[in-house]
Amino acid sequence: MATLKFLSIFIIYLAIVLGLVNSQDLEVGYYKKTCPNVEAIVKKAVADSISSDSTMAAPLLRMHFHDCFVRGCDGSVLLNSTKNNQAEKDAIANLSLRGFQVIDVAKSALEKQCPGTVSCADILALAARDAVSLINGPTWKVQLGRRDGRVSILSEATTKLPTPFDNFTTLKTTFGALGLSVKDLVVLSGGHTIGVSHCFSFGGRLYNFTGKGDMDPNMDKNYIAQLKTKCKSNDVTTTVQMDPGSATKFDTDYYTLVSKRRGLFVSDSTLLTDKQTRAYVLDQSSSGSTFFEDFGVSMVNMGKIGVLTGKEGEIRKQCAFIN
């Protein structure tokens, strides 16, 4: 048993090290000679989308998360299923993803200006940054040079993505296995300041938390009462804002909600169970927040997970299909 445990830890460590080695090939301005207008082209596609649909920022940010947590930031979440294989996109956690057309618009424009040059994975990383900055959130310099993966497997998305039901130990393990710190965990959770969720992702907290028809004692009772007016038991269609009142504005309200036991998910409330993450939540919910700066740093860290560089992978001609 001891040998197997050591081997498992070594494999995880090796994967992290290899990911960091690859990430050294990423750089700001990677396309300055081969496709100098890449950032402007992607930003225009994102801005056009958000101007017509103010809710689009959250899905674009979420798509980048879901891409990086499965096989690394390689654009695999964008691939369609094939005759012989169901892709990540078809996993239950990804069925509510939106914004694929925004990536396709940017890719089409880039293929016209600099064909075969910019990866879909890089477009997705840029789109996530632009989506956040365009709704009054922070901005950061995106390191580029990722290549696109050729593999996308439904079962991997099912098992590797964090879930709304995860406790702190599970989240720490999931993030840590990818080389992300506890601070990255609590900072990236702040992405829940925008967007909506289906009731089934938290409904158990309202109606049947332990299987006895009870409510989650870790959630504010008044908030539960409010949510029950929107979400009926076993509701699988209704959506509610994760940050009520400012779900299309990137701000620090998420941490205020969590500090008041009004985080929507178990994965939100569990941030109060660890000393380090609890301290961060309370700090950000008071004056002098560092969240915007921290978020940019953690997004850069996440963007390095398991990247393909050099001659690995490919540069897809269309983001939904391998070449």
Image (cartoon, grey):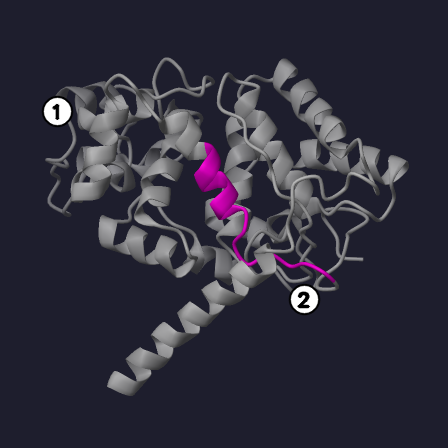
Image position of 286 with respect to 160: above or below: above
Kind of residue at badge 2:
Asn
Horizontal side, residue 181 vs residue 60: left or right: left
Tell me the CA gap for discs 1 and 2: 48 Å
Residue 204, image x, y percentages: 23, 39
Q: In this rendering, is residue 96 above or below 57?
A: below
Image quadrant holding the C terminus, namely: bottom right
Which quadrant, please, contains the N terminus?
A: bottom left
Seen in the image, is 221 located left or right of residue 151? left
**Residue in front for this viewpoint, 262 or 203:** 262
Q: Is residue 65 magenta?
A: no
Q: Residue at x 55, y 31 (%)?
A: 140
Upstream in sequence: badge 1 or badge 2: 2
Depth check: give the residue in front, 29 or 224: 29
Residue 37 higher or lower than 133, as above or below: below
Q: Amino acid at mark 1?
A: Lys
Q: Residue at x 60, y 27 (%)?
A: 130
Point out residue 281 in the picture as x, y percentages from the top left corner. 24, 31
- In the picture of the structure, the residue carrying the numbered disc 1 is 221
Residue 223 placement (x, y as % from top left): 19, 21
Callout 1: few (<14), some (14-19), or many (20+) C-alpha neighbours within 10 Å? some
Q: Is residue 62 visible?
A: yes
The residue mark sitting in front, 1 or 2, is 1
For label 1, the SS is: helix
- Residue under label 2, please give it: 84
What is the magenta range?
296-310
Placement of 213 over or under 227, stated as above or below: below
Residue at position x 63%, y 35% in the image = 126
